[in-house]
Structure formats: C-alpha cells, structure tokens
Image (tube, grey):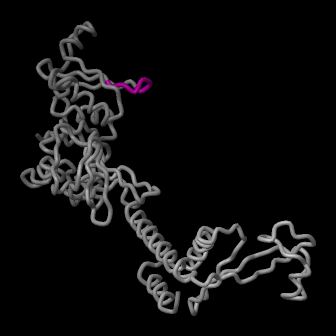
C-alpha cells in the first residue's frame, strides 16, 4: 500500500461521502483478521496504517507478567525491559511482526473492504432517498417476475410489487412502465427493500393529488378514501374555499382529470362525493349514485338508518352490497338501508314526505 492508495481513499471521501478515517479504520480491522488467518496465529495484534504514507505495520501486543504461560500473549518483565526499561507488570508491549509479503495480502483486503463500504454507503443513500417517499407514487419498469412478485426497476434500486397487491386481472410484461404506491421501505442486510402496491387506497389518493392542482395546493382536501381495487372506489372531498367546488375540481373540465385516473386504474369506477360535517348529509352523499330520502343517526351505535325510494334500493345497496359497503368504509358509520315501503311497514305509518335529500356527489365510470 502506498501514497496512491491514500490519495484514492481521499477521492472516495470526496465523491462518495465516506470519511477516509472510517475507511482506514475498517481496513485495519480487516487486516487483523487476514493476518491471523493467513499466518495461522492466535496472537493479539494491532495493525497500523500511516495516514500520510500508506505504510502498514503489524504489532503483536503482549501483557507484561512475572511468569509467562502463553508466549503468544505474554512477555516477561525481564524481556520487556530489554525493549524499554520503563515497562511494569500489566503494561502492554508492542512488537513489530509485519510479514515480508504482507503488502499483497493488505492490498487484496483493502480492496474488498473499500468495495464493501462503498456498496454500504450507496445502499444507505438509496434508503435515505426512499424512506421519505413512503406513501408516495413511483414509476418503474418491469424487469422480471416470479411466482409471488413483480420486480420493478426504479433506477438505482429494484422494488417489489407482490402479485396480491395487483388489481384483479391486472397483468404486466417485461418492459412495461408501471405506477405504484410505496407501502414500506426497509433497510435489510441485502440493501433497501421497497414494497409496492397497486391496490392500496393510498394510490387513489396520490393520483388525485397529482392530477388535481386544487388538492396539491391545499384548497381542496381529501377527507376519506374507500376502495375495492379494480371495481369501485369512493373519495370524499372538501373545499376550504367556498368559491371552489371540490367535486367539480376533481372531475375537471369535461371530466378529463378523473378520466386520467380511471384510465390508470384500468377502468375502476370512482364516486366523488362532498364531505360534510353533518353525518346525515355525508352518509347521503356517500351512497351516490343512489338517491336518499332520509337519514336517521344513532350516535351511541355509530349507525345511520337510511331510507331510499323503492326503485333505488338495489342501487343503494349495490352489486353484492358493494355500494353500501364502500359508503360505510368512507364515512366510518354502519349503514342500514331501507326502502320507503319497508320503512313505512316498520314504522306503521306512511312517510310525510317523499322528497329526496339533496346530494352533492358524482359517479364516474
């Protein structure tokens, strides 16, 4: 090892941000193991690398004792004072034992250590870059697939998209560009592991934030998202500015904004509803596209009983209960839906009004 190597370490420090002293310390530690392995010794040794010249020396460290039981680890007081008359019992004596051909071993070891540390540093930088992007969207290119996952190239790292995080009937082939939601970033022994999803509700939220400037600017906010990936979703929005229509902002001119999201989600239906502080109004909006006549709220049970026109009952419930289920997820309230006739029969009296509640929502196919 020579000055060129020390200069190379300085260059690595400048380019990779790894302190030269950290690299030298790591090389010294690795050289101790290499020395013991290559020279079959159990000695207690110290390796010293001169930070200016790159010169390497190996020192055997021995305890000063009255009676030597293990000459590899101990030295007598008499022998130690031949080296330096000031040594006392329990002092440590260092004796240079640098092998003649140790430079070759040192060079190989140093190369391995530096390569490993650079790799670790790069992994650390990648982890730092992506840990702040949890719950965000990334775009990657499909590289390969196994029985459980699709692997996307994100540039400096490969991310994992489990097959059970795809939307139903969704398939990708090598080279396809895919948008996905980062659910988790972990720093493992093999480097950063980035887990993705296409079915997570967060993907829908982020897509709206990307497509709707009013959401990005904070004028319109997303209050809740309920999603059954690949089939139907509901999103509740609220405007902080009375002059800005939150539903219209999300739909966009001629439906262009929401249609872009529908296309990205392979035709998934999206209901955009207006959030309200009034539970009755919010629940009615959440059952879009069904019309609602009346909502009765039971606070203690956190349940809402909803009455809809007879001809709207199946629409309010949805196919296999999907519309009602999503509305319950969106609002956080249990929802019991009755037709107008059912409500009259249970109450034993006709309804006083069949006027439908005002709803502020829109359903996008």
Q: Quadrant of the C terminus?
A: top left
Residue nearer the viewer, 293 or 252: 252
Residue nearer the viewer, 164 or 133: 164
Residue at (30% x, 30% y) in the render = 328
Indicate yes or no whether the magenta region holds residue 184.
no
Q: Left or right of 351: which side holds 134?
A: right
**Residue 28 against residue 238 in the figure, above or below:** below
**Residue 319 against residue 89 in the figure, above or below:** above
Residue at (28% x, 26% y) in the render = 295
Q: Position of residue 40 (x, y in %)?
A: 64, 68
**Residue 240 against residue 111 in the figure, above or below:** above
**Residue 262 against residue 31 in the figure, above or below:** above
Q: Position of residue 154 (x, y in %)?
A: 27, 61
Residue nearer the viewer, 295 or 151: 151
Marker count (numbered)? 0
Q: Position of residue 66 (x, y in %)?
A: 93, 72
Quadrant of residue 313 within the rendered picture: top left
Q: Name the outermost residue toward the left.
A: 254
Residue at (22% x, 24% y) in the render = 321
Residue at (36% x, 54% y) in the render = 194
* Residues shaded magenta: 299-304
Q: Left or right of 42: which side holds 207?
A: left
């Amino acid at each position: 090892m020579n000055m060129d190597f020390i200069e190379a370490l300085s260059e690595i420090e400048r380019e990779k941000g790894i302190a030269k002293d950290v690299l030298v310390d790591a090389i010294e530690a690795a050289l101790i193991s290499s020395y013991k392995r290559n020279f079959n010794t159990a000695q207690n040794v110290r390796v010293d690398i001169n930070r200016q010249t790159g010169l390497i020396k190996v020192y055997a460290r021995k305890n000063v004792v009255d009676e030597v039981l293990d000459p590899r680890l101990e030295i007598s007081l008499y022998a130690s004072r031949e080296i330096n008359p000031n040594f006392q019992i329990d002092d440590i004596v260092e004796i240079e034992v640098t092998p003649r051909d140790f430079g070759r071993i040192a060079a190989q070891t140093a190369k391995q250590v530096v390569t490993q540390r650079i790799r670790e540093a790069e992994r650390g930088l990648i982890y730092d870059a992506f840990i702040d992007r949890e719950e965000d969207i990334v775009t990657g290119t499909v590289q390969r697939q196994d029985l459980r996952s699709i692997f996307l190239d994100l540039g400096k790292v490969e991310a994992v998209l489990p097959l059970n995080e795809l939307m139903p009937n969704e398939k990708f082939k090598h080279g396809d560009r895919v948008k996905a939601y980062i659910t988790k970033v972990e720093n493992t022994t093999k480097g950063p592991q980035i887990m993705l999803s296409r079915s997570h509700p967060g993907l829908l939220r982020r897509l709206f934030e990307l497509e709707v400037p009013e959401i990005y600017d904070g004028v319109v906010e997303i209050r809740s998202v309920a999603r059954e990936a690949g089939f139907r979703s509901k999103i509740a929005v609220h405007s902080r500015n009375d002059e800005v229509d939150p539903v219209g902002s999300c739909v966009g001119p001629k439906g262009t904004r929401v249609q872009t999201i529908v296309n990205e989600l392979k035709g998934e239906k999206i209901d955009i509803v207006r959030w309200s502080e009034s539970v009755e109004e919010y629940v009615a909006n959440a059952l879009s596209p069904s019309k609602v006549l009346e909502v009765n709220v039971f606070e203690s049970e956190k349940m809402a009983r909803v009455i809809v026109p007879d001809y709207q009952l199946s629409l309010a419930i949805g196919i296999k209960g999907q519309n009602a289920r999503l509305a319950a997820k969106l609002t956080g309230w249990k929802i019991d839906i009755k037709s107008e006739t059912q409500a009259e029969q249970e109450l034993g009296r006709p309804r006083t009004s069949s006027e439908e509640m005002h709803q502020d929502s829109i359903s996008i196919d």
